[in-house]
């Protein structure tokens, strides 16, 4: 009997080798994709936080310019529509009016909040002179604006200044800016 020897020199991969390679590649791809998605979520959250900071600081600076020009507050309406300018209570405003001196070209400013249907935030509108409502959008993503007089025992119309706090919200992110302002053009009678 003549036995031929078989050469076992195959030049391919076995099914087991392919399955192991594919599962290692799958784990690597899953790890890379999870890391990538996590980094994208972090970048999105940081972008929203930066947007809120920019919005808040811009609105605060814009309002500050108008407060510095004014001689005081003439009108404060809270979010429920109640007039609050003759009180000294901390208030979440819906509308506020500032009055300038008689010799000013612009007689005053108005700021009011409006809410779009379906939105969970307000937009801040601004107007000049004796307009009853603002028409120019100054900012958005506002959860609320709180106001309190300085000193705290004076009403808003008799105050020497105000503390202004703007709370912002965008998706799950929140940010708050706050500053105190004095009415520089108000004539004080002690």
Image: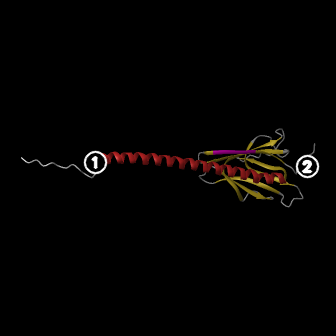
Name the residue tied to disc 2.
Answer: 187
Q: Position of residue 53 (x, y in %)?
A: 67, 49
Give the magenta range. 174-178
Q: Position of residue 15 (x, y in %)?
A: 28, 48
How far across and how far down the image is residue 16, in percent? 29, 45
Q: Determine whether the residue tagged by mark 1 lies in a helix, strand or loop.
A: helix
Q: Main secondary structure of the magenta part?
A: strand
- Disc 1 marks which residue? 15
The furthest residue to the top: 153
Quadrant of the rendered structure where residue 31 is?
Answer: top left
Q: Secondary structure at mark 2?
A: loop
Closer to us: mark 2 or mark 1? Answer: 1
Residue plotted at (76% across, 41% down): 90
10 Å crowding of disc 2: few (<14), some (14-19), many (20+): few
Q: CA distance from mark 2 to mark 1?
A: 91 Å
159 and 19: which one is in front? 19
Query: Is residue 164 among the parts visible in the rendering?
Result: no
């Amino acid at each position: 009997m003549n036995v031929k020897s078989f050469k076992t020199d195959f030049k391919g991969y076995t099914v087991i080798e392919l399955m192991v390679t594919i599962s290692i590649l799958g784990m690597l791809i899953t790890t890379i994709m999870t890391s990538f998605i996590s980094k994208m979520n972090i970048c999105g959250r940081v972008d929203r936080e930066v947007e809120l900071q920019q919005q808040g600081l811009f609105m605060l600076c814009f309002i500050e310019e108008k407060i510095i020009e004014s001689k005081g507050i003439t009108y404060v309406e809270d979010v429920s529509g109640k007039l609050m300018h003759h009180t000294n209570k901390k208030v979440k405003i819906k509308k506020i009016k500032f009055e300038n001196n008689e010799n000013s070209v612009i007689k005053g400013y108005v700021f009011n909040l409006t809410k779009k249907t379906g939105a969970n935030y307000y937009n801040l509108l601004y107007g000049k002179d004796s307009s009853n409502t603002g028409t120019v959008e100054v900012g958005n993503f506002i959860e609320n604006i709180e106001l309190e007089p300085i000193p705290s025992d004076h009403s808003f119309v008799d105050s020497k200044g105000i503390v202004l706090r703007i709370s912002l919200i965008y998706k799950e992110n929140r940010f708050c800016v706050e500053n105190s302002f004095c009415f520089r053009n108000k004539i004080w009678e002690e």
